[in-house]
Image (spheres, grey):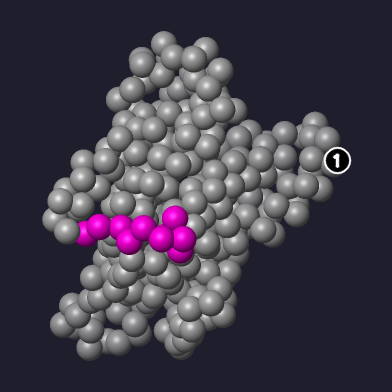
């Protein structure tokens, strides 16, 4: 997601109406990434899918953003270290680790565990930049963390005592932590770049850092099965949850401000669970409901103004 935009009280009414419509549909775009990851995990290796997602997204975005990239080229070079770290976190770890996790855990679990990202962002902001952590925010973080643990351990107290975990859930939890650090860096690290230029440069850095892992994966025998389905899947994750979701999210923030945009965080795991049920035949278990009933209120408490 792009830089948080300031609240704007002088927004054109038509732009506000468009943003309200997007607020309902953008979570579907984010959820598409998880559903596609689960659907093609046997046909496209994880680093390959992450590399081609962001490479294709960058080149599709390039015709529109190229003049701005050229105009800000000196500032991009000056900020290359931050852009590289953002690319590793936001496109590398958050991309590939989700696809690795999709091999052994359900799309519903991915959506609900990733829903904990806002509380991790609040915690990371406190640890990294000493943002004040009040009692309400701390309570929200604790409640959501319990909800994540319910899902990770599938509501099984024996699994908690014996530390019996599904590897995929740990990959997703790591990706959520990386997303939190990425988001906090976007907010707090100074940058002279416009948000879309910073996003394009970050995509490029992310793709570059994923390339060596893709090559090693390929040499090791994990090769993409080239056919209409796999090409379509790579285009989908590049366009829909790549460019579409990120740019749509930024447009909503500009029109409505940060607080209403946070509704996406509540809707995305719900959409993911429903889409996984309808498209992948995944079942909804009682522990999913218990986890959601803890995570979603926890997000509200930890992110409200």
Q: Is residue 297 visible?
A: no
Secondary structure predominantly adopted by residues drawn in magenta: loop
Residue 132 placement: quadrant: top left
Q: Nearer the viewer, residue 20 or 95?
A: 95
Residue at figure coordinates x 35%, y 85% from the top left: 155
Q: Is residue 190 visible?
A: yes
- Relative to 60, 251 lies left or right: right
Q: In which image quadrant can residue 209 be found?
A: top left
The residue that appears at 49% across and 51% down in the rendered structure is 235
The one nearer the camera, 227 or 230, is 227
Residue 62 against residue 46 in the figure, above or below: above
How dense is the environment of label 1, judged by Cα within 10 Å: few (below 14), some, or many (20 and up)? few
Question: Residue 78: which quarter of the image?
Answer: top left
- The residue located at (40%, 40%) in the rendering is 55
Percent coordinates x, y for residue 70 in the rendering: 49, 15
Left or right side of 134 for 20: right
**Where residue 162 sits: x, y (%)?**
16, 82
Residue where numbered disc 1 is placed: 13
Residue 62 lies in the magenta stretch: no
- Number of numbered tags placed on the structure image: 1
The stretch of residues the image draws in magenta is 222-231
Q: Residue at x 23, y 70 (%)?
A: 167
Q: Residue furthest front?
A: 227
| Element on which disc 1 rests | helix
Residue 3 coordinates in the image, percent (x, y): 52, 35
């Amino acid at each position: 997601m792009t830089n948080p935009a300031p609240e704007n009280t002088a927004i054109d009414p038509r732009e506000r109406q468009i943003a309200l419509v997007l607020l309902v549909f953008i979570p579907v775009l984010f959820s598409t990434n998880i559903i596609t990851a689960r659907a093609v995990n046997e046909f496209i290796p994880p680093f390959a899918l992450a590399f081609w997602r962001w490479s294709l997204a960058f080149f599709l975005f390039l015709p529109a953003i190229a003049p701005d990239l050229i105009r800000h080229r000196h500032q991009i070079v000056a900020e290359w270290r931050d852009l590289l770290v953002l690319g590793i976190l936001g496109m590398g770890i958050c991309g590939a680790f989700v696809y690795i996790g999709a091999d052994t855990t359900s799309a519903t679990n991915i959506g609900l565990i990733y829903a904990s990202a806002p509380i991790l962002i609040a915690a990371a902001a406190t640890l990294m930049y000493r943002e004040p952590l009040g009692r309400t925010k701390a309570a929200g973080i604790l409640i959501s963390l319990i909800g994540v643990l319910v899902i990770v351990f599938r509501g099984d107290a024996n699994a908690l005592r014996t530390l019996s975990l599904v590897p995929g859930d740990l990959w997703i939890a790591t990706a959520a932590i990386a997303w939190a650090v990425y988001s906090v860096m976007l907010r707090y690290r100074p940058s002279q770049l416009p948000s879309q230029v910073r996003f394009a440069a970050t995509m490029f850095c992310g793709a570059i850092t994923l390339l060596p892992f893709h090559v090693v994966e390929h040499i090791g025998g994990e090769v993409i099965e080239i056919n209409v389905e796999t090409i379509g899947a790579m285009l989908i994750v590049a366009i829909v949850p790549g460019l579409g979701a990120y740019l749509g999210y930024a447009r909503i923030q500009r029109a409505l401000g940060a607080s209403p945009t946070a509704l996406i965080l509540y809707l995305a795991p719900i959409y993911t669970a429903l889409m996984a049920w309808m498209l992948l035949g995944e079942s909804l278990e009682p522990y999913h409901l218990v986890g959601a009933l803890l995570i979603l209120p926890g997000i509200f408490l930890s992110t409200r103004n």
